[in-house]
Image (cartoon, rainbow, N blue to C red):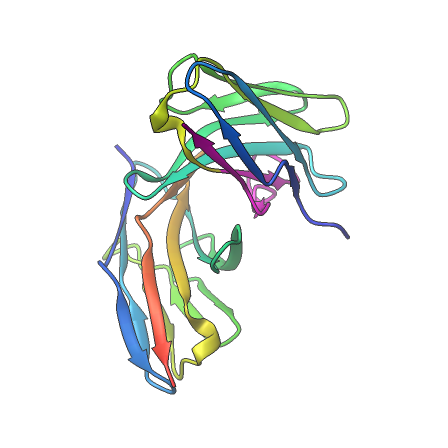
Amino acid sequence: KAGVTQTPRYLIKTRGQQVTLSCSPISGHRSVSWYQQTPGQGLQFLFEYFSETQRNKGNFPGRFSGRQFSNSRSEMNVSTLELGDSALYLCASSLGALAPTYEQYFGPGTRLTVT
Amino acid sequence: GDSVTQMEGPVTLSEEAFLTINCTYTATGYPSLFWYVQYPGEGLQLLLKATKADDKGSNKGFEATYRKETTSFHLEKGSVQVSDSAVYFCAQHTGKLIFGQGTTLQVKP
């Protein structure tokens, strides 16, 4: 079974631009979560989608948004990029959102650099 | 709020040494607990998990026991290898995954 895939793997953007990252979950998984990883703040939860609905949201500004499609694929968007948005963005998928199906499997991440 | 605290790294060990990475958590409920490992340039891999008190998770020689009385989930391995060099994250799930800050392990031949 294929794992979680994320595209693109690397991205360089300029301040003020916007960016869209994509995540394809493991086949059959209906929940997708996004995390931001930085050296200073570590791993922080952005949001979780289950069956196209946002189920949970972390403490990030409204510039960060996401969505999930009917095939469970998910995208996250960051508008008006700031230098501090430079990070590794990780996507994780799970069968469901509740115990015992919420075991999460991570993709390789998208490395975003904002200049 | 809910949180996870791990011992500071880096941890440097010789091959075949015993490993302990401490992890404690604070939670209002009874979370499931996880250890993830991240190799350079890669995403996180689930190493092991425990879903209730006194459960022991194990995988690839690593073990951790869910201790409710001490709110701990320490990671142990009896004999580390160079290939175990990576960053290890402890996490709890309470509707979302909350991670510790990560502990870098370096194993020298």
Residue at point 26%, 64% (across, down): B10
> Is B29 or B97 nearer to us in this picture?
B97
Residue B28 on the magenta span? no
On the image, the x and y values in percent for residue B30 come to 37, 43
> Is A67 or B24 nearer to us in this picture?
A67
Task: Read off the magenta span.
Answer: A89-115
Res. A81 image quadrant? top left
Q: Is residue B9 left or right of residue A8?
A: left
Residue at point 57%, 47% (across, down): A108
Number of disc labels = 0
Q: Is residue A103 left or right of residue B76?
A: right
* Image quadrant where one finds the C terminus of chain A: top left
Q: Is residue B73 visible?
A: no
On the image, the x and y values in percent for residue A101 come to 61, 43
> Is A14 or A33 nearer to us in this picture?
A14
On the image, the x and y values in percent for residue B84 come to 45, 72
Q: Is residue A67 visible?
A: yes
Residue at point 77%, 53% (across, down): A1
Residue at point 36%, 77% (across, down): B107
On the image, the x and y values in percent for residue B109 come to 38, 86
Relative to A30, residue B63 above or below: below
